[in-house]
């Protein structure tokens, strides 16, 4: 959100239209992602004034203060998107188009999956899953690991149709893994049965669903190897990190957070992998803390683990549902 160097901040809110429950909040400052979040009371007030108008059959679409522009937009009586911008020169039209693009990105993957008759669709950049349907995220751990590895190891092709066995979900009956290259380095992946045939994924279907969002997707491609948006606040001495969310079974991984400083990416990856294997096999249980039934065992769980290797000092810290692995110089 926002353009580099424009200054000011942008806050994007997504709420359930019927209940007003926040679904997500994204913020940026000066074109770079920001950790700053709006207080819940402010989010509630912004949604409340919009709902109050709707109850009186008044459509509130935008408002201005001295230094901030606010735009509301509801989609299909399902979700409400709200954007606040203090960037110089921002117009209501620009912010409304931003909300339309955000909603389009939200529904493109799910709509395409529904049109294809499968609940397992993902977008991969350089072998990393950057967006996926709920069905794909619910795949068992073996499939969730092996499918991106398979796609990342294959030579570039415009389209593929591979039979695959799912070690957890279908070890004896093969499924089909369909891949389509939308842009160099960006692949659309479908996991399905006998249908649809690869020929059905023709130019018309791709043009309908993906042509409108190719420009935003193209802008994300340079982030593939790094894994983090430019401008993301990170200490200059961190050479690699792995953040695991145990409940959602998702992770963020990078060994190129700040460019080519220090050891090569291959060395960083090897050291981070070694450290991960060490602490997970020796110190941290495979399940979240709330699943550890023995109170004595729970009390004895380490809060952190550090390993010194020459001039470097990898360290980890553990929370209730996530683990953070860091190697720093």
Image (spheres, helix red, strand yellow):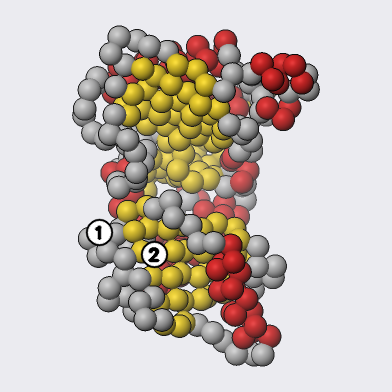
Instruction: Count neighbours of disc 1 (C-alpha within 10 A) and say few if under 14, some if 14 to 19, many if 20 or more.
Output: few
| Number of the label disc, if any, that sits on residue 131 | none
Q: Position of residue 274 (x, y in %)?
A: 43, 13
Task: Answer whether residue 39 is visible to the viewer in this image.
Answer: yes
41 over 152 or under it: above or below = below
Q: Which residue is mark 2?
A: 10
Q: Position of residue 326 (x, y in %)?
A: 41, 25
Mark 1 secondary-structure assignment = loop
**Quarter of the rendering containing residue 297:** top right
The N terminus lies in which quarter of the figure? Answer: bottom left
Q: Nearer the viewer, residue 123 or 117?
A: 123
Q: Nearer the viewer, residue 116 or 212?
A: 212
Mark 2 secondary-structure assignment = strand
Whether residue 86 sits left or right of residue 284 in the image: it is: left
- In 3D space, how far apart are the residues under numbered discs 1 and 2 (Cα atoms)? 12 Å
Task: Answer whether residue 255 is visible to the viewer in this image.
Answer: no
The C terminus lies in which quarter of the figure? Answer: top left
> Total number of numbered labels?
2
Q: Are marks 1 and 2 in contact (CB under 8 Å)?
A: no
Q: Residue at x 36, y 41 (%)?
A: 228
Q: Residue at x 51, y 26 (%)?
A: 317
**Quarter of the rendering containing residue 299:** top right
Q: Position of residue 191 (x, y in %)?
A: 57, 39
Instruction: Count neighbours of disc 2 (C-alpha within 10 A) and say few if under 14, some if 14 to 19, many if 20 or more.
Output: many
Q: Which residue is mark 1?
A: 4
């Amino acid at each position: 959100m926002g353009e580099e160097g424009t200054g000011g901040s942008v806050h994007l809110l997504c709420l359930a239209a019927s209940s007003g429950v926040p679904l997500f909040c994204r913020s940026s400052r000066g074109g770079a992602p920001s950790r700053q979040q709006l207080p819940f009371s402010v989010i509630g007030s912004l949604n409340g004034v919009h709902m109050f108008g709707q109850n009186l059959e008044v459509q509130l679409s935008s408002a201005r203060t001295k230094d901030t522009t606010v735009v509301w937009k509801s989609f299909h009586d399902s979700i409400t998107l709200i954007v606040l911008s203090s960037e110089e020169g921002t117009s209501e039209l620009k912010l409304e188009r931003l909300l339309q693009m955000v909603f389009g990105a939200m529904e493109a993957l799910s709509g395409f999956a529904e049109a294809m008759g499968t609940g397992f669709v993902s977008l991969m950049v350089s072998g990393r899953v950057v967006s996926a349907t709920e069905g794909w995220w619910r795949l068992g751990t073996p499939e969730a690991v092996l499918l991106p590895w398979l796609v990342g190891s294959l030579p570039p092709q415009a389209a593929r149709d591979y039979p695959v066995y799912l070690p957890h979900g279908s070890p004896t009956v093969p499924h089909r893994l369909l891949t389509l290259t939308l842009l160099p380095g960006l692949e659309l992946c479908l996991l399905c049965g006998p249908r649809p045939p690869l020929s059905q994924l023709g130019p018309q279907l791709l043009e309908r669903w993906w042509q409108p969002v190719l420009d935003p997707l193209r802008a994300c491609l340079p982030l593939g190897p790094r894994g983090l948006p430019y401008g993301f606040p990170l200490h200059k001495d961190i050479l690699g990190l792995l953040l695991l969310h145990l409940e959602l079974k998702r992770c963020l991984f990078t060994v190129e957070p700040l460019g080519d400083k220090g050891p090569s990416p291959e060395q960083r990856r090897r050291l981070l992998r070694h450290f991960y294997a060490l602490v997970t096999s020796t110190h941290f249980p495979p399940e979240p803390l709330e699943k550890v039934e023995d109170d004595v065992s729970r009390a004895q769980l380490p809060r952190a683990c550090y390993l010194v290797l020459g001039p470097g000092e990898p360290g980890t810290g553990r929370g209730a549902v996530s683990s953070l692995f860091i190697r720093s110089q």
